[in-house]
Amino acid sequence: MLDRLQHMIQRLANGRAILILLAAVIALRVIMGLPNDPFGLNPRLTRLGGAAILDMQIGYTPKDAYALLEGLGAEGRQAYAAMLLIGDTLFLISYSLLFAAVAAWLLARVAPPDHWAQKLSLIALVGGISDIAENLSILTMILAFPQRLDGIAWFSSLIKITKFGSAAVGAPLIMVFAVMLVWKRTVGRRRQSV
């Protein structure tokens, strides 16, 4: 399964696919950040004093989560659910695939194709899977509202460790791969000129 996933990412590791994914990430981020976003969520958050949606908070308690859901009202919760199902799902798929494709593109240039390091490109997908789990948890809380599901709220808050942890590991790895590629090309040029 990992090998199949790795091969899929390696097929995306080309300039055209990376540019398309980058454009999608930027477009979705801009659209969801607009003051009058298509889901109607941002104006409701502004009325709550600029509160951040749950998936943008570093951590929260069930009390905090349900205070936000209560404050959003029924229409706000519907808007939040729509944003999670449409905009955020497209965003997390795009950013996960983008980071995995960039890592795979760099790795293809610094390590042999069958080297174990090639699997490191899959770290970005861990963040995406964690983000999906978080979204499903928040959707579950929204759909069950006003019933409180404190265990789900704790899980949703804690899964951020994996979500942000994969970014904390993946982003520096991409930088390391980029430095390795520059180093490899610089040493190669020096050898050719000698």
Image (tube, rainbow, N blue to C red):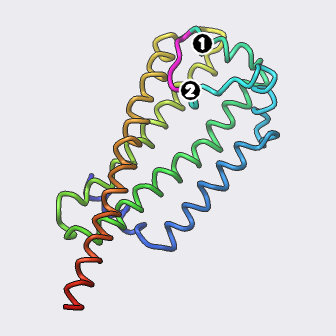
Q: Based on the displayed image, in which of its 4 quarters is residue 167 positioned? A: top left
Residue ranking furthest to the front: 194
Question: In the rendered view, would you say 16 is above or below 133?
Answer: below
Give, as a single range, the part of the protein colored magenta.
57-62
Q: Residue 57: which numbered mark, if any?
A: 2
| Residue under the image location 43 percent in, 66 percent down | 12
| Residue under the image location 32 percent in, 52 percent down | 173
- For numbered disc 2, what is the local secondary structure? loop
Q: Position of residue 29 (x, y in %)?
A: 65, 48
Nearest the viewer among 104 and 174 is 174
| Residue under the image location 46 percent in, 12 percent down | 151
Q: CA distance from mark 1 to mark 2?
A: 10 Å
In the picture, the quarter occupied by the C terminus is bottom left
Left or right side of 113 for 106: right
| Mark 1 residue type | Asp
Mark 2 crowdedness (10 Å alpha carbons): few <14, some 14-19, many ≥20: few
Mark 1 crowdedness (10 Å alpha carbons): few <14, some 14-19, many ≥20: few
Question: In the rendered view, would you say 14 is above or below 163?
Answer: below
Q: Kindly identify which residue carries mark 1.
A: 64
- For numbered disc 1, what is the local secondary structure? helix
| Residue under the image location 38 percent in, 33 percent down | 162
Answer whether labels 1 and 2 touch (C-beta < 8 Å): yes
Nearest the viewer among 14 and 48 is 48
Q: Position of residue 2 (x, y in %)?
A: 27, 52
